[in-house]
Image (cartoon, helix red, strand yellow):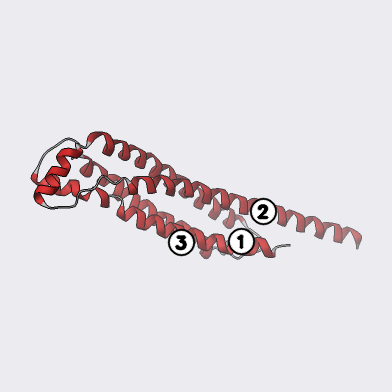
Amino acid sequence: MFKPQMKFQKILSLSLLIFAAVCFVFSIGITTDLYGLYNASAVAVFDGIKIFKDIQAYNDNAVIFSIVLIGSCLLPFIFATNKRRLYYIDNYVTIGIQSGIFIGYGIYILMNSIHYKNRFLTEVDFAEYKATAELFKFKYSESTFFFDAGIVLSILCFVMVLLLVGNLVWKIMIMNKEKQLLMSGEQND
């Protein structure tokens, strides 16, 4: 009765940790496609160049948030939520904390990815940016890869929370079923 759920629980815990590491790598690379704007700001002034400076706070907070996300993914290993057959209060608290942090990170990344993608596409004067990049021979990019990846990553955060909650519901159903079996066995004695 417990074996499929226990196997899923272990795989889910490890998957969440790996996913959190991916979020960290993403957070480090958020400004990669905008680095050309930084170079351009050293030699020219044109519309939209300010976005590189403005996005730094988002980048810094995303890195910190992703480290917290990794920490929350270590909690199941610390409190044995990943391998415990029966859950206790600390296991419920662990799942609650983990779910909350995943939701928070997902919302933060989604809101900022959409915001800065819109700013990048509407504020940057791409003709001036390209001309400056070609003149001074530095990287030019119109890529919105990291913004799009942020949107996908945030959706995956919400999916991970659904998997966590789904696993918890499955665990509670199994624990209740086991409790009923034990109660009916005691009544027959």
- The CA distance from mark 3 to mark 2 is 23 Å
Residue where numbered disc 3 is placed: 18
Identity of the residue furthest to the right in this view: 188
- Residue 95: % across, % down: 55, 53
Vertical placement of residue 53 versus 67, above or below: above
**If you read the primary sequence from the N terminus, does the residue marked by circle 1 or circle 2 appear first?**
1
Mark 2 Cα shell of 10 Å, populated few (<14), some (14-19), many (≥20): some
- The CA distance from mark 1 to mark 2 is 10 Å
- Residue 18: % across, % down: 46, 61
Vertical placement of residue 110 versus 176, above or below: above
Q: Secondary structure at mark 2?
A: helix
Mark 1 Cα shell of 10 Å, populated few (<14), some (14-19), many (≥20): some
Front label number (3 vs 2): 3
Residue where numbered disc 1 is placed: 8
Residue where numbered disc 2 is placed: 170
CB of mark 1 within 8 Å of CB of mark 2?
Answer: yes
Q: Please give the label number shown on residue 66.
A: none
Query: Along the horizontal axis of the image, is 37 left or right of 3?
Result: left
CB of mark 3 within 8 Å of CB of mark 2?
Answer: no
Query: Along the horizontal axis of the image, is 140 left or right of 103?
Result: left
**If you read the primary sequence from the N terminus, does the residue marked by circle 3 or circle 2 appear first?**
3
Q: Residue at 36% of width from left, 54% of height from top?
A: 26
Query: Along the horizontal axis of the image, is 31 left or right of 42?
Result: right
Question: Residue 118 appears in which quarter of the rendering?
Answer: top left
Give whichever of 126, 148 is nearer the camera.
Answer: 126
**If you read the primary sequence from the N terminus, does the residue marked by circle 3 or circle 1 appear first?**
1
